Image: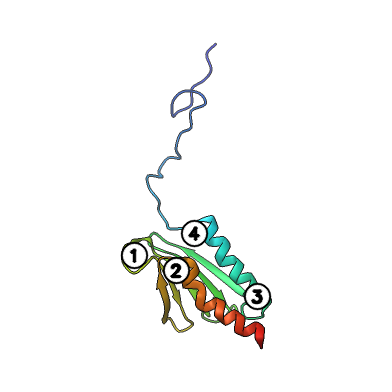
Amino acid sequence: MAAPQSPGGSPGQVVPFPGRGGADQVGFERPELMRILDLYGRMVAAGEWRDYAMDFTRHAATFAAFRRAAERPQARVEKRPALRGKQGMWTLFGEHGQVLKRGHDLANVLAPMERRLLKAVDE
């Protein structure tokens, strides 16, 4: 008796999940998320942040950090791959929505938050 064939082809063949043509949403790669969460952890330890939220859409991935859960985010990091060739796909927004830093490198974009952390530790 022959082995039953899977709907996608021969036995043992890897078949893509149906309905997933391209990327439906932008996400953070592991090293990017590790760098963001490392900063978040240090800000929590310094007493600056207490909560975070992530949002993934077709155009952007966003990480927002909050001092308190009921407030607007104190800082927001956004990744927009469509801006990669222009001013850079990374943007750091402040509490009132103002652009604090833009760039091609995540470490440089997070630098203002790193400086804020140093000030919080010194106090």
Of 72 and 94, nearer the camera is 94
Instruction: Specify the amino acid type for callout 3.
Output: Val
Q: Earlier in the sequence, mark 4 or mark 1?
A: 4
Q: Alpha-carbon distance for marks 3 and 4?
A: 21 Å
- Count every numbered label the image shows and give the total: 4
Residue 35 sits above or below residue 11 on the image: below
Disc 4 secondary structure class? loop
Q: Which mark is residue 83?
A: 1
Q: Earlier in the sequence, mark 2 or mark 3?
A: 3
| Image spot of residue 25 (x, y percent) | 42, 56
| Image spot of residue 27 (x, y percent) | 47, 58
Q: Residue furthest bottom?
A: 123
Quadrant into which the N terminus falls: top right
Q: Residue furthest right?
A: 45
Q: Alpha-carbon distance for marks 1 and 2?
A: 11 Å
Q: Earlier in the sequence, mark 3 or mark 4?
A: 4
Of 2 and 29, nearer the camera is 29
Disc 3 secondary structure class? helix
Of 71 and 108, nearer the camera is 108
The residue that mark 4 highlights is 28
